[in-house]
């Protein structure tokens, strides 16, 4: 049975904290992040969780291809947890349990049965608890430090309305997206290989896109299974626009390279823009605000990564 998991707060993807020297020595340190470590066992457990939840074939080749991306996820989770701790945001066991209950409800399974099913699938429950803890903690950081910086003015809304009205008659695409960020040029090839593997999996099993997006995507909408809603022509980079224009409805794109990373799109529907399709001012304000929040939160995380001591031995 495939297990559908989602992150809890925002669209951004813990490994164990404060690992004892004995445990680290026994399991082998894969990454050092400031004063915390990720072990090879942590990476193995997270790979098992992601393979099971997304339906990706758990083969040796797939695990090898996925390891850099999953290691990066764990690094980012540690940075999120460290920043939350620095700001005094601690996540209780009760809050983690609430998150687990929420995921179980999404699967229409009582939480105790859900935990039994995970363990029967060979999944270490701690890796899921850690993922939940990191997302809750990061949600608190973003709410406290980033959200107060977000301001959407009436002028912003007017400009978006003018853009939409100007594009009446143009194309709109109802999209789901998986986005893999390329933070450093030297990582681009490995991330491209991961994106290709995900594309091959999605082409064979398109119904797994939502669960793959929840686990892998770094785009806004990841927690909603990659849903981007309706996107108008002129709102994406040229390379993306060219592909969307020719991609038939109901198909998945191969990885598209943009300035920031690799995108995989599922074109769920297409239509022409009409006056009736223009959203109201409240919806536009929410859309602009969420886009800015996502960008600022990503920038915040990149700054944390740039200023951290990271020794990656993987």
Image (cartoon, grey):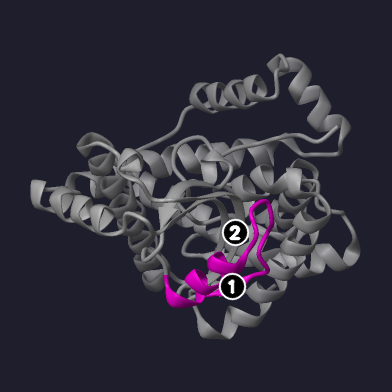
Task: Measure the C-alpha gap from mark 1 to mark 2.
Answer: 9 Å
Q: How crowded is mark 1: few (under 14 residues within 10 Å), some or many (20 or more)?
A: some
User: Image check: 113 left or right of 81?
Assistant: right
Q: In this view, does 5 lie to the left or right of 201?
A: left
Quarter of the image for the C terminus: give it: bottom right
Q: Where is residue 79 in the image (x, y as percent from the top left)?
A: 45, 57
**Crowding at label 2, few (<14), some or many (≥20) Cα neighbours within 10 Å?**
many
**Which residue is located at x 48 percent, y 55 percent?**
219
Does residue 89 sit above or below 11 in this rendering? Answer: above
- The quadrant of the rendering that contains the N terminus is top right
Do callouts 1 and 2 mark residues in contact (Cβ within 8 Å)?
yes
Q: Is residue 263 left or right of residue 138?
A: right
Q: Nearer the viewer, residue 93 or 101?
A: 101
Give the residues in magenta. 237-257
Between 285 and 307, the residue placed more toward the observer is 285
Q: Name the residue under label 2.
A: 265
Quarter of the rendering containing residue 91? top left
Q: x, y (%) of residue 132? A: 55, 37
Residue appearing at x 53%, y 41% in the figure: 223
Q: Which of 127 and 32 is in front in this view?
A: 127
Residue at 26% from the left image edge and 46% from the top image edge: 289
Point out which mark residue 256 bears.
1
The answer to whether residue 38 is above or below residue 260 is above
- Residue 180 locus on image (x, y percent): 57, 65
Badge 2 element: strand
How many labels, in total?
2
Q: Does the magenta stretch include residue 251?
A: yes
Label at residue 7: none
Q: Residue placed farthest to the bottom in the image?
A: 186
């Amino acid at each position: 049975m495939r297990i559908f998991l989602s992150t809890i707060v925002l669209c951004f993807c813990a490994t164990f904290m404060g690992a004892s020297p004995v445990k680290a020595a026994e399991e082998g340190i894969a990454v050092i992040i400031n004063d915390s470590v990720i072990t090879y066992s942590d990476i193995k457990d997270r790979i098992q969780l992601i393979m099971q939840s997304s339906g990706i074939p758990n083969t040796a080749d797939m695990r090898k291809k996925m390891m850099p991306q999953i290691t990066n996820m764990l690094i980012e989770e540690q940075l999120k947890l460290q920043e939350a701790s620095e700001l005094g945001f601690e996540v209780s066991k009760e809050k983690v349990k609430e998150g687990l209950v929420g995921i179980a409800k999404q699967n229409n399974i009582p939480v105790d049965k859900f935990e039994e099913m995970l363990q029967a699938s060979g999944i270490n429950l701690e890796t899921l608890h850690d993922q939940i803890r990191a997302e809750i903690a990061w949600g608190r950081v973003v709410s406290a430090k980033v959200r107060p910086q977000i301001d959407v003015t009436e002028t912003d809304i007017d400009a978006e309305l003018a853009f939409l009205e100007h594009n009446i008659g143009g194309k709109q695409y109802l999209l789901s997206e998986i986005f893999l960020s390329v933070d450093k040029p030297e990582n681009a090839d490995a991330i491209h290989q991961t994106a290709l593997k995900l594309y091959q999996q999605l082409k064979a099993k398109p119904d797994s896109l939502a669960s793959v997006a929840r686990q892998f995507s770094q785009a806004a909408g990841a927690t909603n299974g990659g849903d981007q809603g309706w996107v108008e022509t002129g709102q994406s980079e040229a390379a993306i626009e060219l592909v969307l224009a020719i991609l038939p409805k109901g198909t998945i794109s191969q990885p598209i390279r943009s300035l920031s990373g690799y995108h995989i799109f599922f074109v769920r529907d297409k239509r022409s823009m009409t006056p009736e399709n223009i959203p109201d001012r409240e919806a536009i304000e929410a859309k602009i605000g969420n886009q800015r929040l996502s960008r600022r939160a990503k920038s915040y995380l990149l700054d944390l990564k740039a200023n951290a001591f990271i020794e990656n031995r993987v």
